[in-house]
């Protein structure tokens, strides 16, 4: 049974990038951007399912105009097509506003695609803001079941439901869900593949469709900065760590001095 799978992706700064803050905002000039790693696990699972059962993978990314390069990576590893939600009027929102935009995009995909979509994958959170809210909010807006932090996923024999294993507080939950559903990936769901030269070249020929607020039927006054329910008052880097301290002497002397420092200076014992 073939599946039409949508993967919600996010463009984030490379975790190895040095982040600078200016005028209460992250300076984006010179930053290297990548696909969010958790979203890549969702993309990998979608690709595996289509390779096994047939179907199509559509990557959806909401971001600025220069996010096209990041979208191409999803196409290079195997996504069949991509939708780029790009409109300055939609930018600057919080998790609630972003979820409204993505929910509108999924409604449009469902309306325009034969059979709609069978499942939607996303990362359990994004490594830039760590909200872990957007996919859950999208599920609520679309009245769809949602399973998060999935580390194992198997289709059931009926082809219309799935078995999900979640990692929760060091334990594992086993959940069954009907489809379509919103599913979020956790590290360990699969091994992320790298784009091949053939895939990179082929990605240039795969379609990327641009959608703006008008195409989604969204009133721009209700999303983006205008629709945000959370306001960031101040943004600043964490304080620099104090330098480490090397305790001289043999093991017995150093251990005694360490205990004294932990008790009298750090006051942790």
Image (tube, helix red, strand yellow):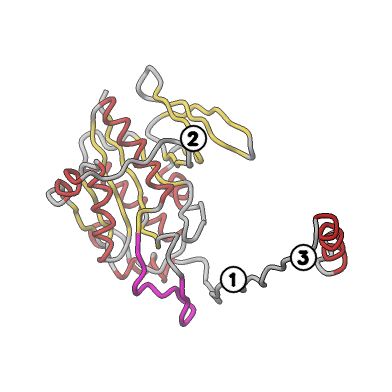
Q: Secondary structure at mark 3?
A: loop
Please report the residue visible at 45 percent of the width from the left and 52 percent of the height from the top: 134
The residue lying toward the viewer, choosing from 250 and 157, is 250
Above/below status of 259 relative to 153: below
Above/below status of 104 relative to 77: below
Magenta-highlighted residues: 19-33
Can you tell which of label 1 and label 3 is closer to the viewer?
3
Most common secondary structure along the magenta stretch? loop
Q: How many marks?
A: 3
Position in image of residue 90 (x %, y %): 34, 66
Report the quarter where the N terminus lies.
top left
Name the residue that disc number 2 marks: 151
Position in image of residue 156 (x %, y %): 41, 21
Please report the residue visible at 32 percent of the width from the left and 58 percent of the height from the top: 62
Callout 2 environment at 10 Å: few (<14), some (14 to 19), or many (20+)?
some
Q: Earlier in the sequence, mark 2 or mark 1?
A: 2
The residue lying toward the viewer, choosing from 219 and 239, is 239
Instruction: Give the residue at the far top of this rendering.
Output: 157
Name the residue that disc number 1 marks: 238
Relative to 144, 65 lies left or right: left
Name the residue that disc number 3 marks: 248
Position in image of residue 260 (x %, y %): 87, 64
Q: Are marks 2 and 3 in contact (CB under 8 Å)?
A: no
């Amino acid at each position: 049974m073939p599946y039409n799978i949508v993967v919600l992706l996010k463009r984030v700064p490379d975790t190895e990038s040095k982040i600078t803050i200016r005028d209460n905002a992250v300076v984006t000039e010179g930053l290297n951007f990548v696909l969010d790693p958790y979203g890549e696990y969702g993309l990998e699972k979608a690709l595996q399912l289509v390779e096994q059962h047939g179907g199509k993978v559509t990557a959806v990314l909401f971001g600025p105009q220069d996010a096209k390069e990041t979208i191409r990576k999803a196409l290079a590893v195997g996504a069949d097509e991509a939708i780029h939600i790009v409109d300055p009027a939609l930018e600057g929102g919080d998790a609630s506003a972003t979820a409204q935009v993505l929910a509108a995009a999924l409604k449009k995909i469902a309306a325009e695609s034969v059979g709609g979509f069978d499942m939607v994958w996303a990362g359990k959170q994004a490594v830039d803001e760590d909200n872990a809210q957007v996919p859950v909010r999208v599920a609520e807006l679309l009245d769809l079941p949602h399973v998060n932090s999935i580390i194992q996923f198997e289709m059931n024999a009926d082809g219309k439901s799935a078995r999900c294993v979640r990692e929760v507080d060091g334990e594992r939950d086993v959940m069954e869900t009907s489809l379509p559903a919103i599913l979020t990936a956790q590290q360990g769901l699969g091994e992320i593949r790298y784009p091949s030269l053939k895939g990179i070249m082929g990605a240039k020929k795969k379609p990327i469709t641009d959608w703006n607020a008008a195409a989604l039927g969204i009133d721009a006054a209700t999303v983006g900065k205008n629709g945000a329910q959370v306001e960031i008052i101040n943004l600043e880097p964490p304080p620099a760590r104090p330098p480490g301290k090397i305790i001289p002497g043999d093991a017995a002397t150093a251990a005694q001095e360490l205990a004294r420092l932990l008790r009298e200076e750090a006051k942790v014992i």
